Image (cartoon, rainbow, N blue to C red):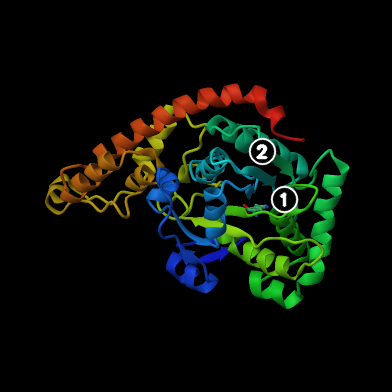
Amino acid sequence: MTNAIVTPWEVKGNIDYDKLIKEFGISLLKELPDIFNKNVLFRRKVIFAHRDIQRILEAIKNKKKFVMMTGLMPTGKFHIGHMMLAQQMIFYQKLGAKIYIAVADIEAYNARNQSLEDSRQIAIEQYILNYIALGLKPENCEIYFQSARSKDAEKSNTYYCLQNLLARYATFNEFKAVYGEISPGKMLSALLQASDMLHPQLKEFEGACPVIVPVGIDQDPHIRLARDISQRFKDEKLLQLSSTYHFFMPGLSGGKMSSSDPNSFIALTDTAEEVKKKINKYAFSGGQTTIEEHRKLGGNPDIDVSFQYLRMFFEQDDAALEKIEKDYRSGKLLTGELKAILIEKLNMFLEKHQEEREKAKSKIDKFIFK
Ligand code: TRP
């Protein structure tokens, strides 16, 4: 555990979530209204922590305007781990939020040495098409590239202007404390991300209003910085940001899903054959090594990757999931049988999803370069 690295630029090793919650000073999610609990991610505490979510709950209760703002790093293939954030975008859109999504192509340029052209292509083919296929709608939704905020010059100017104005309210020591190591490119990316999160409240956009930023926990340093400097910025009133944090879906063999290792994840474009092969061959099992032992001792669903995928998304029915868990723990359900359940669920989902993804190709222009 001690060798885990969790920074906005790099996530490595086994993440000790409890330690991070304490270190970062975020709160565990407790009681949520029923509309939230209809969603498996909230109901099963896959989204587990927050900062200031009450401001969002109040906006929903009082039918007041609010924004969901988040971003994507356009690298690698879109996999089932990325789907968690996509599901949250769609969830908040259905609740009436205005959706802002930043494609972090400037950050990819500065922190990952990736060209703007590559970022653009990956963002569209891998991310945005899949968001649309999963159900994101063009109404009340702005997807923009950090390198090209808007065709509307006033909007564009004010977004880049905010990035620059915010610089006055951050110190070098603060950057070092929040990020550890820092380069000029990373410093600019952090300020640009602060502008991503804060600019929806400028008068050229929505005006001051509650903004929820759902992210993986690695992004919290960015959120802390943006929250701190937004309160020192006095040119326009900005309400304090709210945020939520989700667990990462484990990679197939445990650890992290890594875009550089296709055997560590299921991509949303994988074929049924690939899914079957990957799950059977690589999905880490919490079962025993022989059938006899498994029947006697039972399996451990808590560390079993196939079970975790079912829990985190692919078995939405609580009663069905509970039965799988009970049978696996007792040894009645074998690892092979558990994997077969997941493969069937996953492939059913992907078959429909891939049809939707084809249809999404003609809709892409409604979403970008507005
Ligand atoms: N840095 C984020 C990542 O690596 C991407 C990002 C850019 C983002 N702007 C954002 C995330 C604003 C949340 C809010 O994934």
Q: Is residue 167 left or right of residue 136?
A: right
Q: Is mark 2 within 8 Å of ligand 1?
A: no
Q: Is residue 256 left or right of residue 220?
A: left
The count of marks equals: 2
Direction bottom: furthest residue: 173
Q: Position of residue 146 (x, y in %)?
A: 76, 48
User: Residue 29: horizontal and vertical position, in percent?
Assistant: 44, 60
Per the rendering, the mark at residue 200 is: 1
Q: Nearer the viewer, residue 267 or 248?
A: 248
Label 2 sits on a secondary structure element that is: strand
Q: Position of residue 325 (x, y in %)?
A: 24, 47
Residue, x 46% and y 46% (percent of image)? 264
Q: Residue placed at 54% from the left, 54% from the top?
A: 58
Q: Kindly identify which residue carries mark 2.
A: 141
| Residue 94 vertical position relative to residue 14 in the rendered view, above or below | above
- Please name the residue shown 63% across and 36% down the image: 128
Q: Residues within 10 Å of mark 1 (few under 14, many from 20)?
A: many
- The residue positioned farthest toward the front in the image shown: 62
Amino acid type indicated by mark 2: Cys
Kind of residue at badge 1 = Pro
Judging from the image, what secondary structure is the residue with disc 1 in?
Answer: helix
Using the numbered discs, state the Cα–Cα distance from disc 2 to disc 1 in whole angstroms.
Answer: 12 Å
Residue 85 horizontal side relative to residue 309, left or right: right
Q: Quadrant of the C terminus?
A: top right
Query: Whole-percent x and y of residue 202?
Result: 77, 53
Q: Are marks 2 and 1 in contact (CB under 8 Å)?
A: no
Residue 92 appears in the picture as rendered: yes
